[in-house]
Amino acid sequence: MKEPISGFSKLTKGEKINWLTKTYLNDDPKAVEVLKQYWNKDEKLQQLHEEFTENTLSNYYLPFGIAPNFLINNELFAIPMAIEESSVIAAASKAAKFWGSRGGFKAEVIDTIKVGQVHFIYQGCEEKLELFFNQLEPKLREAAIPITQNMEKRGGGIKSIELRDRTAEIDHYYQLHCNFETVDSMGANFINSCLEKFAEVLEKEAAIWEDFDEKERHIEIVMSILSNYVPECVVRAEVRCSLENLSDDPDLSGEQFADKFLRAVKIAETEPFRAVTHNKGIMNGIDAVVLATGNDFRAIEAGVHAYAAKDGQYSSLTHASVENGIFKFWIEVPLALGTVGGLTSLHPLVKLALEMLGQPNAKKLMEIVAVAGLAQNFAAIKSLITTGIQKGHMKMHLMNILNQHNATLEEKEKLIEYYKTNVVSHSDVAVQLEKLRG
Ligand SMILES: CC(C)(COP(=O)([O-])OP(=O)([O-])OC[C@H]1O[C@@H](n2cnc3c(N)ncnc32)[C@H](O)[C@@H]1OP(=O)([O-])[O-])[C@@H](O)C(=O)NCCC(=O)NCCSC(=O)C[C@@](C)(O)CC(=O)[O-]
Ligand SMILES: NC(=O)C1=CN([C@@H]2O[C@H](COP(=O)(O)OP(=O)(O)OC[C@H]3O[C@@H](n4cnc5c(N)ncnc54)[C@H](O)[C@@H]3O)[C@@H](O)[C@H]2O)C=CC1
C-alpha cells in the first residue's frame, strides 16, 4: 500500500531514488540504472543541472541540433534548436536554404513593453481612489528605486503605472497595471520585485490616507505578478519574392503555388481547428530555439496563444499576400525573451547556443526566434499543399520506427534505401522488417 511521504525534499538524491523505486517501481535495480545512466560523469556539471530545479533524480536529454543557412537581415546564422520531434530541424533547414537564395528573411522588433499587475480590492468611492492614486504614483516609483536604478542605467525600468477599474467584472476589483522595459532580460523577477514593492506601498499609504474612511483605508492586495500576455512585446519577420521566383517545382508555377499557399493561410486565419495546428507548426520552430537559448518556453507558449486569440477568435500567427506579382509571407508574434538572466549564463549548451548566434541582445534573439517560426510554418505549408506532410515527416521519423522494432544496422540500411522510393508508415515498416527477418 502506497503512503504519502513527508519531508521528501529533505532526503538526499540517493534516498529519493530508493524511495521512488521501492514505492513505485517494484524495487527494480534497472530503474536505478536508467536514472544513473543519464548522470553526467563530470560531477560539477551534474550538480549544476540538479540545482536548476528541485527533487532532481536525473537529467532528461533533448537532441540539440542546428539549422544552418539562415540569412536574416543580410547576416548568416546557424540556428540552435533543442527538440525531440523528427523533421522539424530538417524543415527549418530546408526553408532557410529556400529563402537564402531569395533574399533571406527580414525581421524587425516592433516594441518590447512587458506588463505586470497588482490586483487589489478597494471598497469605497472611486473618485477618492483616483485622487489617492495620483499622489501615490511618484511614491511607488521612488520606493522601487533600489530595484530599478541599474535597469534604468541600461535604458529600462518602469514605463507607466495606471490605475484600472475592473469593478464591472468583479466587485471592488482594481489593478495597478504597469508597463516595464527590461532590456536584455526576460524580466520576470525584476517585474515581480517591482510589483511586490508597489503592493506594499499601496497598502501602507492607503492605511494613512486621510480622505479615506475606515473601510477605504483597508485595501486588500490579492496578488502581484507579471503577465505573460505581452501584446506590445512584438516582433515581425517576413520573406518576399517575385512569383516567377517562388516555385522550385517544374510542375507548379509560382502563381499556382502562391494560390494554394494563400488559401492554406486563409483557412488558418478563419478556422480555429486548423489555426491551432498551423500555429503548433510555428511553435515547433519557436520553442526549439527558445529552449536551446535557455528561455522560458511556457511563458512564450502562453503569450503566443493569447496573442493568436487577441481579436476574439483563435487565428493564424502568419499571413500571406500577393501584390503586384510579389509573394509576401510574414509573422507577428509576441516574444518576451532574455539573453541575460535565467539559465543563459549557467547552462553550458545555452552559452554555446548564444555564442554561435554571436551573443545577440534580446531584440536580436526575438528576430531570430520569429524567423525560425516563420521558416517552420513555410516548410510545413509547402509540404501540406504539395506532397502532403507524411512523405517528408515519415522519412525523418523512419529511424524512430526502426528503433522501436530494434532493427539492426543492416536492416536499417536496407529499409532506408527501400523507403527512398516508398511511403513510410508504421504498419509498412513492420511488414518490411518481417519480410527481411523471414
Ligand atoms: C522533411 C523535409 C525537409 C524533407 O524534404 P526533402 O525535400 O525530402 O529534403 P531533401 O532531402 O531534398 O533536402 C533538402 C534540404 O532539406 C533539409 N533536410 C532534408 N533532410 C534533412 C535531414 N535528414 N537532416 C537535416 N536537414 C535535412 C536540408 O536543408 C536539405 O538541404 P542540404 O542539407 O542537403 O543542403 C520536408 O518534407 C519538409 O519540410 N517537411 C515539413 C516537415 C514538418 O513541418 N515537420 C514538422 C512536424 S509535423 C508538425 O508537427 C506540424 C504540422 C505539419 O502539423 C503543422 C501544420 O499542419 O501546419
Ligand atoms: N510567469 C513567469 O513567466 C515567471 C517566470 N519566472 C522565471 O524568471 C526567469 C527570468 O527572469 P529575469 O528577471 O529575466 O531573470 P533574472 O532573475 O536572472 O534577472 C536578470 C537580471 O539581470 C540583470 N541584467 C544584467 N544585464 C542586463 C541587461 N543588459 N538587461 C537587462 N537586465 C540585465 C538585471 O539585474 C536583471 O534583473 C526565468 O527563469 C523564468 O522562468 C519567474 C517567475 C514567473
Image (spheres, rainbow, N blue to C red):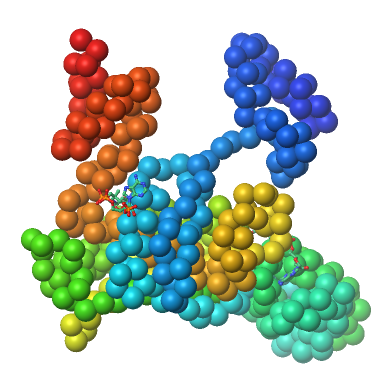
Q: Nearer the viewer, residue 80 or 135?
A: 80
The image position of residue 71, as x and y in percent, is 41, 69
| Residue furthest left as drawn | 251
Is residue 414 depicted above or below 256 in this figure? above
Query: What count of labels does the image hold?
Result: 0
**Which residue is at a point 45% across and 77% down the rendered structure image?**
73
Ligand 2 - quadrant of the structure image: bottom right
Is residue 306 depicted above or below 162 in this figure? above
Quadrant for the N terminus in the image: top right
**Which residue is at a point 19% across and 86% down the rendered structure image?**
324
The image position of residue 97, as x and y in percent, is 33, 62
Quadrant for the C terminus in the image: top left
Horizontally, is 70 left or right of 225 in the view? left
**Which residue is at a point 32% across and 41% down the rendered structure image?**
396
Q: Nearer the viewer, residue 215 or 230?
A: 230
- Tell me the quarter of the picture where residue 10 sits: top right
**Which residue is at a point 24% across and 12% down the rendered structure image?**
437
Instruction: Note whether residue 280 is visible.
Output: no
- Tell me the quarter of the picture where residue 49 sits: top right
- Tell me the quarter of the picture where residue 44 sits: top right
Q: Nearer the viewer, residue 274 or 48?
A: 48
Instruction: Note whether residue 200 is visible.
Output: yes
The image position of residue 35, as x and y in percent, is 63, 25
Is residue 102 depicted above or below 355 in this figure? below
The image position of residue 278, as x and y in percent, is 33, 58
